[in-house]
Amino acid sequence: MKKSFITLFIYMLINSYNINSQNIYSVDKWMEYIEEMASETDDDDRIENLYSDLSYLAEHPFELNSVTREELTRLPFLSDQQIEQIISYRKKYGKLVTFYELKNIEELDFQTISLLLPFVYIGDISVDKRPFTVKNMLKYSSNELQIRYDQCFQQKKGYCSYPDSILQQYPNRKYLGEPFYHSFRYSYAFDERLRFGIVAEKDAGEPFWNEYHKGYDYYSAHLFLKDINKWLKSFAVGDYKVSFGQGLVISSDFSPGRSSIVAQAERRTNGFRRHFSTNENDYFRGVASTVSIKDLDISFFYSFRKLDAGVDNYEVSSFKTDGLHRLERDWNKKHTVPMQTYGGNVRYATSNLAIGITALSYSFGKYDIQPDPKPYNLFYFRGNSNMNISVDYMLKTNKLKFYGETALSSNKAVATLNAFQLTPVSYLSLLLLHRYYDRRYQAFFGSAFSQNSTVQNEQGVYTGMQWTPFAHFKLSLYADLFRFPWLKYGIDSPSSGQEYMTQLDYNSGKNFSTYFRYKYRKKENNQTVENESTQNVLPYSQQRFRLQLLYGLQSAWVLKTSADAVYYDEQQGKQSLGWMISQSIGWKPSSFPLQSDFYIGYFHTDDYYSRINSYEKNILYAFNMPSFYGKGIRLSFSFRWNILDKLSVSAKLAHTYYADRDLIGTDQEEIEGHNKTDVYVLLRYKF
């Protein structure tokens, strides 16, 4: 019954994908995966990077009969077992002739196949890689130019006019630049082996062409070589990203974790990638390379760049990481502290065994990092230089997998993460993950599975189960129990918490799918007790509910209805409720080079504590998941038009009406009135 259902599902899915474009599963499923992860993190830059990476892969899919194991690991929703099954099936039965054959791979259920389809195709792979010659690099290369422009229609407080006398006394009342966002990106690629790119950007409010500054605020460039020969696996010059192990020492990737794919929490990216993003903080600038000798990879890198920070007499009180330079105080912090970083990794890896050693050192020249002393930051890094070293490991069989990493910082503090994954049958997967991050552990570039934003001061046990009992249904569950042995910002004592999630998915196999998700989170924070002047550390809880229905009409229409609710409750009696109903309509005809999406949502929340996040389509390569609180309506309309074979435009108009306020935003971002309207435009030329 199960295989018959999957066969029928794949038949309809591929027909819709290749014939009439009614691919409501393949187009939207991976976007929903990103949406869910975004709802659980404040790391907007890395979420947008992940979204941009997957958007690029959807635009440049892998050939299914030649795709490598390493390339498939770039798709975070695929498990190791699924990747191995795809490779093994291909070796055993030869080339796949049609997508229908995916149903024969036991590890792939229809939901995973729907996630996979946008990123693969079946085509001609008989052509060998072309040699590096000037003629080939000119004839067979691809070039892409992207120009983006965003602007808010309403005037914000930071752009108002003030007398010179006021600005002399309060220089940070007014933005130094123009009220629009603008970016420029150019990329050159010779298949996957050679890439070159340039990025330039100014944020809204940053000066672009006036008396303060001429030109973009941020520039980036890179040259990236990959698999040039048998031994040179990668080589980067300029700006690049680095990830090794599970992120206890260094990682530029988004940390997987508490999403509906509950049994996939492993970081699988090891090595270097190009930095082709407008993220002004999370990258390295210099040179990097990986040399491969059979199953042994040897990587090394060097980076030197300047960071934004508040400095007083060579003492750094804090780093500025948002990349915004709109006010005079922002410019005073721009590129003030030099940072030199060097390190490497030696990794032995086969399909069933991997072990790696990572070492990293970084220093800040003549500057000392000295955060303002507070009880909660007693164990933060202080000084001029630091070093981290770690060992990561992976051992697996057909049904079992053990992976993890253990790291040390210069002060001999330890951080360790270890996970055990069990897949007894194709439709059931279990994960048990333990983490211990010493309160004294210090890793400037660490980013791992955690409740904190840093790899420090946390202990926890996470367990997840994903079960597909019937062809139409999938059940996902996880529980995360954690504690913070030392104080945190806003919490004046050691604290603890717990988080649970359950999600039930249903797919009709035709033109309808739905899921219901419930999340419960309990933590502690400082609360003021009634009739007392002092604060106590007390628990609070948050419950989130989400129901989504996705259905297709005819051959070109896709409709998505969502209902969200949030309930916030503090022990001292503070309660807050929020909800939102939204509807999106997508139109993608097969015979016309235009696709569009319309979104409308009504939100009603008591306050900021019960705010609602809601995903809506944005322009190409850009992720958007705004947060709303209060009462109001959200509207947006976006489209993508392929004007010519090589020229396309992507645009979005978004409007928010607030029924409960006369002022929107705070400080320099404040807008007078009930309405906020934004426009986003991206022009792309491929040649």
Image (cartoon, rainbow, N blue to C red):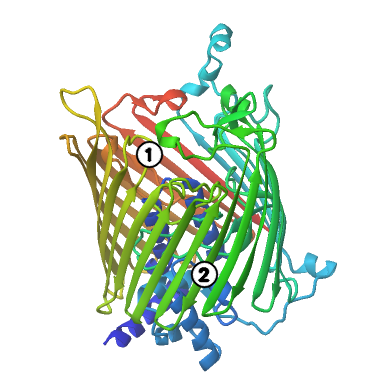
Label 1 element class:
loop
Q: Is residue 615 above or below residue 668?
A: below
487 or 241: nearer the eye? 487
The furthest residue to the bottom: 93
Say which quadrant the N terminus sits in.
Answer: bottom left
Q: Position of residue 518 (x, y in %)?
A: 24, 57
Tell me the tag on residue 488.
1
- Position of 268 compared to 38: left or right? right
The furthest residue to the top: 165
Q: CA distance from mark 2 to mark 1?
A: 31 Å
Residue drawn at x 40%, y 35% is 376
Tell me the tag on residue 387.
none
Say which quadrant the C terminus sits in.
Answer: bottom right
The furthest residue to the right: 134
Q: Is residue 349 above or below residue 2?
A: above
Q: Position of residue 92 (x, y in %)?
A: 52, 93
Q: Position of residue 112 (x, y in %)?
A: 40, 73
Q: Position of residue 342 (x, y in %)?
A: 68, 52
**Residue 607 in view here:** yes
Q: Name the residue beneath numbered marker 2.
A: 393
- Looking at the rendered structure, the kind of residue marked 1 is Lys
